[in-house]
Image: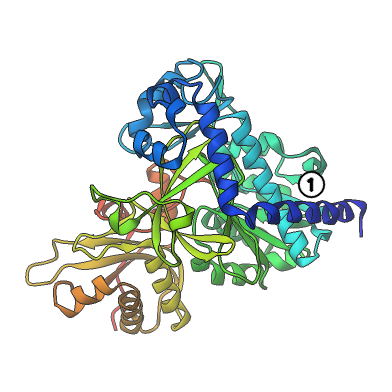
Amino acid sequence: MSLKSVAAKVFAQFIARKTSRWATHPFDTQKKVFKELINKGARTKFGKDHEFVSIHSYEDFAAKVPIRDYEELKPYVNLVVEGQPDILWPGKPIYFAKTSGTTSGAKYIPITQGSIKMQVEASRNAILNYIHETGRADFVDGKMIFLQGSPLLEDKNGIKLGRLSGISAHYVPNYLQKNRLPSWETNCIEDWETKVNQIVEETKDEDMTVIAGIPSWVQMYFERLKEKTNRNIGELFQNFELFIFGGVNYEPYRKKFEELIGRRVASIELFPASEGFFAYQDSQTEKGMLLLLNSGIFYEFIRVDEFFNEDRKRLTLQDVELNVDYVMIISTNAGLWGYNLGDTIRFVSLKPFKIIVSGRVKHFISAFGEHVIAKEVEEAMMTATQKTDAKVNEFTVAPQITPVEGELPYHEWLIEFEKMPSDVDRFVQILDEALQKQNSYYYDLIEGKVLQRLKITPIKEGGFRDYMKSIGKLGGQNKVQRLSNDRKVADKLSNFKVNLPKN
């Protein structure tokens, strides 16, 4: 065992004890974070506009600070972008994380010295927690890769601007610099396909032990590696120990990954965003991710089924329940106050507080009142692939409210198959029944003959990748939208469809 791996074990034990202290006192931890945020926020324009000096309790805060999404917070963000200090947080942010916008172009998410510190520590602690739990640390001597955006940053009125993953690349600790791949020059390549091909060249002969990134893009990397070397990933990288991912559910990809690798490898799920780092998987045997309560973020929650009601109720940790979908609201040490992150989560443990990501509040299908969410379609797909010989690379779901004359409306599943099911009708039946079992509203609509059974539209091999490229979102941090309440994605993807085989 190397000196580095021994040191990693010792440090992991220290971090585990530190984590346990706040995780076992969640309410006190959040109260402390809340107080610190309000005290600092009182010195800002936002804090003065919302009378932070008179906020002495959470109830005061909820009464004075409404829930806002990015568009509603944008007037304040614009002042920060102009270079004005003390707007949302004391001083100026050190970065803007640039993300895709909704109704008005790009979004600029402020990142402060304190918030980037928490991001970096959370990433580190997720790996240290794995070492502490499993006792495995030899992998720290191998090569590690994170498929990420370019670390080249622009300047915006004296503040550095870039993708979060590119910003994070500047914070790789010194003791990992020799282990890190790809090279800086390769990481700076903007064209994603060129970049992946170069990463393949740089890594194919290395001892890769940790690989991280969004599953769909890591899959592309694995496929290119296999084409280049004609070897399984596990054979090529014999010490490959750990796959780290975030942003999307890994389960729909797991079967394909295990085929490409040739064996099962351990994985760690993360829940990072430009707005903060919220949770990481803390157990290889238990479900869920540990909600980070001591990372400069104060959390609120609103039930998904109440979110669009005028009398929706804002909840804190004391009020949440197991297995209920909540919209997560955050206030952070980067100056986001009562901010609607847009993600929906579900608690799978309350001691400690552990969550899974169940979808996006704007990404659902409720064209007929069914309110189907991402978690439900992903679990239905897993059931269908487990019970049939089908293999699926990617998929998305949309409502079809104007079918051909004489037909009932339905959900259309646009699926890129690696292997088409030998019995398509059985595949569709299993898929539809699995969704009905999870969602009683969908079940009632099928039973009541409001909807007909779902239909599938096969997409050609590489079709999703071609679609993402056509909209300028081919790259490591861009994700395919799993489902939507309109047909914008479905109609564009239809350009890449193929015909179903005839029985």
Image: 189 above or below 248 = above
Where does the image place residue 129, in percent across and percent down from the top left?
72, 57
Q: Residue furthest left?
A: 406
Judged left or right of residue 299, residue 441 is: left
Judged left or right of residue 275, residue 166 is: right
For the N terminus, the quadrant is: bottom right
Residue at the image point whose x is 59% and y is 61% from the top: 352
For the C terminus, the quadrant is: bottom left
Where does the image place residue 203, in percent across and percent down from the top left?
72, 51
What residue type is disc 1 on? Asn
Image: 4 above or below 352 = above
The reply to whether residue 357 is in sight is yes
Residue at the image point whose x is 38% and y is 40% from the top: 62
The reply to whether residue 277 is in sight is no
Image: 478 above or below 232 = above
Q: Quadrant of residue 409?
A: bottom left
Q: Quadrant of residue 72?
A: top left
Judged left or right of residue 229, residue 7 is: right
Where does the image place residue 493, in percent across and percent down from the top left?
32, 55
Secondary element at tag 1: helix
Image: 127 above or below 154 = below
Q: Which residue position holds label 1?
A: 179
Residue at the image point whose x is 77% and y is 61% from the top: 132
Judged left or right of residue 141, residue 409 is: left
Task: Pick whichever, 176 or 93, lies toward us.
Answer: 93
Where does the image place residue 97, in percent across and percent down from the top left?
52, 33
Residue at the image point whose x is 33% and y is 57% from the top: 304
Q: Quadrant of residue 497?
A: bottom left
